Amino acid sequence: MARDDLAQIEGTVVDAGAGGLYKVELENSVVIQAKLCGKMRRFNIRVVVGDKVTVGVSPYDPSHGLIMYRHK
């Protein structure tokens, strides 16, 4: 699935786990697992607990996501 096909939802990082997995609480108070997208890993963009992020969520599996942007 292409990156453009994902539904983009705002959320807050609540936990940083091992292996680059994060738990993100979405605006509708649902907690999902998410990992960093490739460009964020490539340019060493750090994400810590409490950051506001934009998460791309697949319509086929809404329990996993891809962190696409960290808000300042």
Image (cartoon, grey):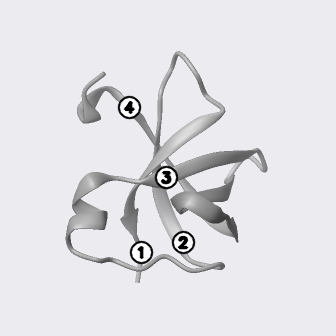
Image quadrant in which the C terminus is located: bottom left
Label 4 or label 2, whichever comes before in sequence order: 4
Q: Residue at x 27, y 35 (%)?
A: 3
Residue type for callout 4? Leu
Evaluate if marks 3 and 2 touch, with contact meaning CB atoms under 8 Å apart: no
Disc 2 is placed on an element classified as strand
Please tell me whether mark 4 or mark 3 is closer to you in this view. 3
Please tell me whether mark 3 or mark 1 is closer to you in this view. 3
Q: Residue at x 55, y 49 (%)?
A: 34
Q: CA distance from mark 2 to mark 1?
A: 5 Å
Label 4 or label 1, whichever comes before in sequence order: 4
Q: Which mark is residue 6?
A: 4
Work out whether residue 59 or residue 45 is closer to the camera in this orientation and state it. 45
Residue under numbered circle 1: 71
Residue type for callout 3? Lys
Disc 1 is placed on an element classified as loop
Label 2 or label 1, whichever comes before in sequence order: 2
Residue under numbered circle 2: 52
Q: Residue at x 68, y 45 (%)?
A: 32
Disc 3 is placed on an element classified as strand
Evaluate if marks 2 and 1 touch, with contact meaning CB atoms under 8 Å apart: yes
How crowded is the residue under tag 3: few (<14 C-alpha within 10 Å), some, or many (20+)?
many
Q: Which mark is residue 35?
A: 3
